[in-house]
Image (tube, grey):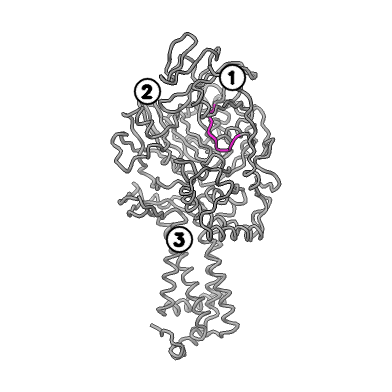
Amino acid sequence: MSEFRSRAAATVAACRFALARRDARTLAAVVGIGYLLAYLWVTDLLTIRADAGTGWLLVDEPLARALERRGPISFEPVALLEFGYGTFLLSPIDAAIGVALSALVGLNLALATLAVVRPAACGIDAGRGGDDAGRGAATGVAAAVPALLSGTVCCAPAIALALGVQVSGALLATLPWLLPVGVVLLVGTLSYVAGKIDVDAGNEDGNTTAGAMGLEGHR
Amino acid sequence: MQPLEVAVAPVTTLSSYESRRSHGSFGLSTAIVSLTAVAIRSARGCVFSAHDRDTALSPASYCLYMTRRSRRSVLASGTLAAIGLTGCLGDSGPNADSSSSSYDEGGGANGVTPEEMAATPDESAVETSPVPTAKSQLPVEYALESLREATVENVVPRDGIPSVDEPIFEPVADVGEGAEPRPDDPVFGVVRNGEAKAYPRSILVHHEIVNDEIGGEPIAVTYCPLTGTAMGFERGDVEFGVSGHLLNSNLVMYDRAEESYWPQMLATAIEGPLEAASLREVPVYWTTWETWVEAHPDSVVVVRDRDYVRDYENDPYRSYNPPSGYYAEDSDVLFEPLTADDRHPPKQPFRCSRPDDRPLAISLEGLREHGVYGISGDDREDDYLAAYDATLDVGHLYRVDDASGYEFDADASAVTGPDGERHDPADLPLESLSAYDAMWFAWAGFYPSTSVHE
C-alpha cells in the first residue's frame, strides 16, 4: 500500500514538474485539446458541416436527461449548438469523460516527451532510462487508442458497418470495456514514465543543465 | 392484367458479399491487417473497389462517402485490432462461424430452423391487457423459443434510442426554408380518420418510435433503419419503447404497460404476458417529402422532440438520398439473418405482406412498372391484387376472388376492374391487406417461405 502511495505521489510530483515547464505545458495542452476534439468528433457529438445554421436548443429537463445512459458508457446530450460550420451536441458526462481522457493523454505525451527528448533536464540517464521512457511513451500513445474508441460504444452497428463485418456477441461484450481499459492503460503508463523521472535531480540542476542545453527554464 | 408471376427470381451471384465474409476468430494478423488497411486507405484517399463500383456512386459522391466512412473505419479498425490483440473475438459469440457465409445458399445462417409457431396467446392476459391486440394471430415461421434464442440483446440499453412521446408538429406549409427535408428525402405518412401526419425518416432514424395520436386514435409509428421497415400499430393508452434488442436485425419494441417484447416486423410478441399475441397494424406509407406535401398539403409534420436532442442531419448509417452506406442495395448486413436468401441484393426494397396462405414479396420496381399485379396459384387459397398508387409512389394489396381482369391505366393512375369501372388504387372495393416495405434480407429471414413477384 505504501508503495502504491509513493508511486502515486511520484506521479503527481512528475506531473506538476512537467506542467511547471512552458514547453511541456504547451505540448500537453495542444495534445489534450486535439484529443478532445477527436473524441467529440468520433462520438458524433461534434460534426463539421458547411451548411449548418446557427442557434441552439435545450431539452426540457436537462439535469434529468444528462444522467440517462444511451450506451454502455455514453450519456444523453442536453443541448444542440449549431455554429455555422457544424454542430455540437452537449452531453455533460460524455464531455467530462472526454476532458479527463484528454488530460491523461496530454500528460502522458508531455511527460514522455520530456523524458525522451530532454533526459538530462529531467534527471534521467540518456541511455537505458530514455529507452524505457520511450517505451512508456509509445505505450501511452497506444493506450490512447482504446480510450478514443470507447466513444463509439454507443453504436456497435455503426462500427460493424464501417468495417463490413457482422456484429457478434463477443464484439458487443467487448466494446464496453474499451473505456476502462483505456483509462487503466493511460494511468499505468503515466505512472511508469513518471517513475523514470527524478524530479529532485531535475530541480537541482535543471536550470543549469537546461541553460547549458539551451532549454527553457522552470517557470 | 399482368401475367401471374410467382417464379423465383434468377439467383444473383453476390460474390462480393460472400468473399468479404470472415467473421469469427480475430487474431493478431487480423489486427495488423485492419490497421494496415486503414493506413493504406488513408494514404490513398478515395479508392474504388469492385464492390464500391456496384453501388453506382459517382466519384464525387463516392469520395464524400469515403470521407464520411473513414472516421468510423479508422475507429472500427482500431477497435477490432484492440479486440483481436486481446483475443476476445473467438468463437464464443452466438453468431461466430468462421467457415460459413451469411449468403451461402440454403440459408439457416443463424442456425434457426423455420417451423410453424405452435404457441397461442394467453386469452385472459389478452383480455385484461391495455395493449390492443389483433383478433387472430399473424403468421410466424419460427418457434418462439428459437426467436428468443436468436435475439441479440442489449445492442443499446433499453430506451438508449429514445422514443418520441410528445411530438411537436408544424403544418407542412409552414416548415421554414432550409429546415424542411429535401424533396426526395423519405418521409413516412399516416392518414387516420381524415388527419394526415408525416414523419421524416431523418428524425425517426434517431428515435425509431413515435407514440402519437392520429385522428383521435393512439398510434405508434415505428421505423427500423436496419430492416428498412416503417410500420404503425394501435397502442391504446400504452406507449412503446425501444428495448435495445434486435431480432433478425429488426427493432424489438417493448410495451411500457406489461413489458412484452414485440419484434416490429412480426408484430407478434415473442416474450412477456402477451407472448404469441399480435398487434393491430396501421398503414404507414413510405414516400418522399415532395410527394407527401403534394398529396397532403394540409398535413402536419413532426419537427423535433422536446425531451431529447439529436442532430437530425447526421444519419449513423449514411444516407437514403441517394442510398449509400448501410442503405445501399448490395451492402452487407450487420447481423446474421434468421435465414439467408441471396436471390436478391440484401437491401432491395419489397412490398411485403403475410396472408395466411403464404407470405409474399412484391418488387417495388416491378410494381411501378406493371401498375397492377395479380397473384394466385402457388398453393394459395386466395387471389391477391397489388396496385400501384402514383399519388404517393406506394403499393396497395387486396384480397380478391379472381385476380384476373384488372388493368392499370397509367395515364389516369387508376385501376380498371373486370366490370370496366375505374378505381383509385388506394380505394379498390376489395378487402385491403396489411403490407409494408422491407429490405429483402429481413423479409426473407423472417418469412423464408415467401413467394417473390417482380
Amino acid type of the residue tagged 1 in the rendering: Leu
Q: Position of residue A83 (x, y in %)?
A: 33, 55
Tag 3: Cα neighbours inside 10 Å, few (<14), some, or many (≥20)?
some
Residue position marked by numbered label 1 in the rendering:
B4
Residue B193 badge: 2
Whether discs 3 and 2 lie on one chain: the answer is: no
Magenta residue check for A65: no
The residue pinned by badge 3 equals: A38
How packed mark 1 is, by other alpha carbons closer than 10 Å (few <14, some 14-19, many 20 or more), is some
Does residue B347 belong to the magenta stretch? Answer: yes
Which residue appears at 51% of the width and 29% of the height?
B365
* SS under mark 2: loop
Amino acid on which disc 2 is placed:
Asn
**Residue B156 in the image, given as x and y percentages of width and height:** 52, 47
Residues in magenta, as a range: B344-352
Q: CA distance from mark 1 to mark 2?
A: 35 Å
Residue B95 falls left or right of residue B437 = right
